[in-house]
Amino acid sequence: MEDLPKLPPDLEKIALDLILGQEMPLNANQHAVDQNPIYERVFTRNGQKVLSRSNPRFSLEDQFGDWVSKNISTEWKQIGVSNSIALKGSKHYTGDAKQSADQVPHTDLTRHYTLMYLLEKGNEDQRTVWWQEPGYGLQRKRDVIVWEPDHLEKVAEVIFPIGTWAFFNTNILHNAENVQEYRIAVHVGFEVDPFGVFMRTENDLVL
Amino acid sequence: MTLCYKIMDHLPNVPDEYVHLALTTVNDTIKQHKTITDDYQDQPVSMINTIQERVFVRNGQEIVSRYNPRYTLEPYMNAWVNDNISREWSQIGVATSVVMDQDKNSEMPSHCFHTDVTRSYVLFYLLESSNSDQDTVFWREPGKSLHKKRGTVPRETDHFVELDRICIPKHTWIYFDASILHSVENIQGLRTAIQISFDCDPLGVFVKG
């Protein structure tokens, strides 16, 4: 969504200060992350148990709400900043599964579309991948997690650039892959598609 | 043209046993109440939406909207819906249209403009209606987004533009986008429907695949 304005530097700084000010992984009393908590998710890939990366997200609504409503859309539901973290070796995980550089494929719990604005990433080739499960529709209900994802069929894949809004459908199974270190992003979550990017018209049905 | 709804007449009719169950649920939990009070939300059958007082202005006059309490059918219908409709539903329920004072049914014929609170899309299956000319109407506020956030209830609506309307037939599945502002007009009394709610569009009608 290159037509959308870039985040002003002062807001970028607020987001980075907020996320980098967190002890990572979060300590116990920071568990109540209001938008996306830390999940311990072990899934099976190529026959091996692996530990998903986690993506805790913290609210920026008080600081960003007016700017987003004026410059992006008034229809947002959540605004937050997240980072991708490894749980292996932390107090959150004491099991023996190997830490994966990938998230387990999932649909989101709190939103149906998101505008994501990458601020920083630890390695250039972090991929966002969308999947379809054979026998199921492309659009899935909230909070679907595919614990044994080897049979999923890849639908699309992209490397998001830094400093650019990317709008995607979080009802389609997706994950971030090859995240070797950090992946810090601002998210504007929606329950609707206010831009009409993903919506059909009657003409589409005729065609 | 804006796609607001689609008639899904290829989907199977609801079996009689569930139609009966839905109507019994409504009769047992809703119709016994003459007025809307908190006890609508204190029933043995779980309520799956909320009743909020909604007042809107039409032609300069304040109008009190009708209400649409909805009760779950999930324990009974989930397997049938999974097998015959979709596994991606978020709610299954039966709703009926009521007013604050049921003696004034015909004086309050509208559900005001709104987007739904609990869902983005809904499959709607009308069971009963008091009059056959009840219209579901879709609207857009000029200069504003077509798709509005959940629970949007504009107060002043005279400047809104009508996008489309449908008089929903009985015993036919109608699938509509509940994030487009919509109203229901000319309800003279009864309007009872089974409703399957979705957070996503598993039927691929509204969202590009």
Image (cartoon, coloured by chain):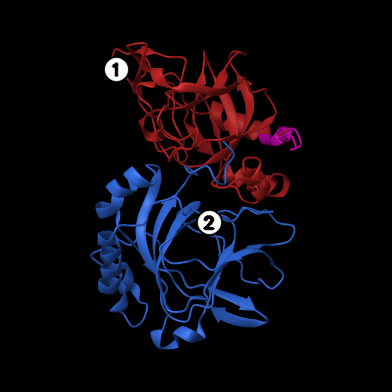
> Disc 1: which chain?
A
Identify which residue is drawn at 54% across, 46% down: A191
Question: Which disc is residue A94 wearing?
Answer: 1
Query: What is the x, y in percent for residue B72?
Result: 31, 58
Q: Do labels 1 and 2 share a chain?
A: no
Query: Left or right of B93: which side holds B199?
Result: right
Establish if A149 lies above or below B46: above
Location of the C terminus of chain A (image quadrant): top right
Q: Which of B115 and B195 is in front in this view?
A: B195
Q: Does the magenta stretch include residue B69?
A: no
State which chain is coloured blue.
B
Could you tell me how far apart the alpha carbons at marks 1 and 2 are, in whole angstroms? 45 Å
Determine whether the residue tagged by mark 2 lies in a helix, strand or loop: loop
User: Is residue A148 visible in this depiction of the protein?
Assistant: yes
What's the amino acid at mark 2?
Answer: Ala
Establish if A101 lies above or below A35: above
What's the amino acid at mark 1?
Answer: Thr
Establish if A13 lies above or below A72: above
Query: Left or right of A43: which side holds A101?
Result: right
Mark whose residue sits in front, 1 or 2: 2
Query: What is the x, y in percent for residue A57?
Result: 50, 34
Do the residues under discs 1 and 2 have CB atoms within 8 angstroms? no
Query: What is the x, y in percent for residue A37?
Result: 42, 34
Mark 2 is surrounded, within 10 Å at the Cα level, by few (under 14), some (14 to 19) or many (20 or more) other residues, namely: many
In the figure, the shade used to draw chain A is red
Majority secondary structure of magenta residues: loop
Q: What stretch is highlighted in magenta?
A: A2-11
Mark 2 highlights which residue?
Answer: B178
Residue furthest to the front: B10
